[in-house]
Amino acid sequence: MLSTEKREAIIAYVASQMSQKRFEHTLRVEQMAVYLAEKYAVDVTLCQYAALLHDVAKEWTMAQYEQVVGMFKLNPELMQFGSEICHGPVGAMATLEWYDHHESVKQAIMQHTIGAVEMDAVAKVLFVADYIEVGRTFDGVEQARLLAEKSLDLAIRYKLKQTITFLAKKGTVIYPETVHAYNSWVNKKLGEDDWKKVKKY
Ligand code: GDP
Ligand code: FE
Ligand code: FE
């Protein structure tokens, strides 16, 4: 668990960077991340760092994104896809000090919007917690929650599939890494026991 002091310092900073609505989402993601971390024996503190900081950059300006992309030599192509794609990598690099440079936290925040071919346990917890936190109400969220009770991997595959479908239906440009992550997870051999228990995915 994060110490109360550290947690409150992070919370005050995060709250100063975003709307009340997004801040409340952030706290719900933390709550779900702690639940999943305990359930799947993942480091709770690292999951809290990742959850609390994951959307820190979501409301930043393009000028702020540009600055961080330049400073940390992130792929400039990120900028063309707007804040939806930028806010993970930018937030991860800009807040290194807040989470003591933990590599897992950095990767988790970087990957939280589009996923990745290889994700470690902290990244998996954040990716799923962001999707199923108790305030989410979209079609399919109940199925996602059911899957998350059985296996993080099943929930991740479901999220990637739903997200790609949703973006394609809207006619949104899909970031190549999103397609890449989707392709690899669709082909992944996941725990068959878990898989068989789930009738419909
Ligand atoms: P949030 O920050 O808590 O709202 O959640 P996310 O970081 O997961 O997602 C931000 C938005 O990016 C969501 O609306 C996703 O559907 C969207 N998104 C995910 N992948 C892509 C992509 O490849 N391209 C675009 N344009 N949007 C995407
Ligand atoms: Fe996000
Ligand atoms: Fe989020």
Image: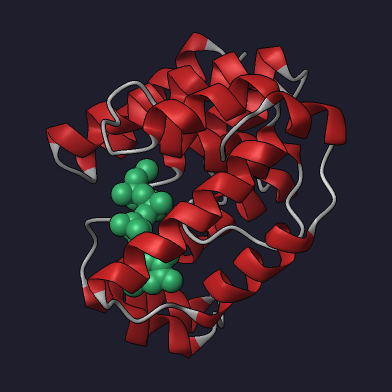
Q: Residue at x 24, y 27 (%)?
A: 24
| Quadrant of ligand 1 in image | bottom left
Q: Residue at x 49, y 25 (%)?
A: 145
Q: Residue at x 51, y 61 (%)?
A: 114
Q: Which residue is situated farthest in the left direction here?
A: 20
Say which quadrant the C terminus sits in.
top right
- Decide which of 163, 16 is in the foreground and name it: 163
Q: Position of residue 10 (x, y in %)?
A: 41, 31
Q: Is residue 112 left or right of residue 37?
A: left
- Decide which of 182, 193 is in the foreground and name it: 193
Picture mark count? 0
Q: Position of residue 78 (x, y in %)?
A: 44, 81
Q: Is residue 123 left or right of residue 71?
A: right
Q: Is residue 52 visible?
A: no
Q: Is residue 193 above or below residue 109?
A: above
Q: Is residue 16 left or right of residue 99?
A: left
Q: Is residue 1 visible?
A: yes
Q: Which residue is situated farthest in the front direction here?
A: 199
Q: Position of residue 163 (x, y in %)?
A: 42, 57
Q: Position of residue 27 (x, y in %)?
A: 35, 24
Say which quadrant the N terminus sits in.
top right
Model colouring: secondary structure
Q: Is residue 122 above or below residue 48?
A: below
Q: Residue at x 47, y 30 (%)?
A: 143
Residue 199's quadrant in the figure? top right
